[in-house]
Image: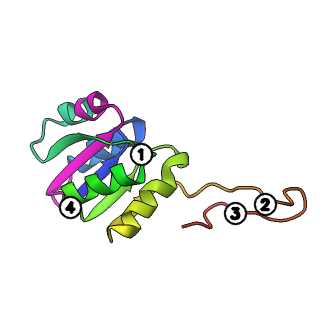
Amino acid sequence: MKALVIGAGGVGRAIVNIASRRSFISSMVIADRELSRAEQAVIRVKDSRFSAAEVNAAELEDIRALIRKVKPDVVVNAVDPRFVMPIFLACEIESTNYIDMAMSLSRPHAHYPNSETGVKLGDEQ
């Protein structure tokens, strides 16, 4: 399986460490806003199946471009929940499988925030 992990923080590094012990991973790209963080995660596992990339998880088109370049079987979201929707939408548009530990955030009703339900946690996914 070819995977793209977005986020090289604690969760992303843990995913890389676990994936490095799994033979079904044919390749994994770990991407982060700071390329050096992604590179550090790759260096730690010392495994040629892993590589680093730079991506801005807030920018839909940046994520889409990386998905088209990597052509992963699955994108794993390992970033802050604020970035769920750009990553989720990029995967949907690019017809790519998506895995996440979080969900889209809730938002209050636009006109009646104290009496009406707005968007509930996870509704946008």
Q: Is residue 7 left or right of residue 4?
A: right
**Percent x, y of residue 43:** 18, 31
**Percent x, y of residue 62:** 34, 49
Q: Are marks 4 and 3 in contact (CB under 8 Å)?
A: no
Query: Could you say which disc has been placed on residue 109 in the image?
Result: 2
Mark 1 lies on a secondary structure that is: loop
Label 4 vs label 1: CA separation? 17 Å
Query: Could you say which disc has been placed on residue 2 in the image?
Result: none
Q: Residue furthest right?
A: 115
Q: Which residue is mark 3?
A: 120
Query: Could you say which disc has been placed on residue 57 in the image?
Result: 1
Label 1 vs label 3: CA separation? 22 Å
- In magenta, the rendered stretch is 22-39
Query: Could you say which disc has been placed on residue 71 in the image?
Result: 4
Earlier along the polypeptide chain: callout 1 or callout 3? 1
Label 3: few (<14), some (14–19) or many (≥20) C-alpha neighbours in 10 Å = few
Residue for point 53% across, 54% down: 102
What's the amino acid at mark 3? Answer: Lys
What's the amino acid at mark 2? Answer: His
Q: Is residue 36 above or below residue 121?
A: above
Label 4: few (<14), some (14–19) or many (≥20) C-alpha neighbours in 10 Å = some
Residue for point 21% across, 36% down: 42
Mark 2 lies on a secondary structure that is: loop
Residue for point 12% across, 41% down: 47
Q: Are marks 1 and 2 in contact (CB under 8 Å)?
A: no
Q: Are marks 3 and 2 in contact (CB under 8 Å)?
A: no
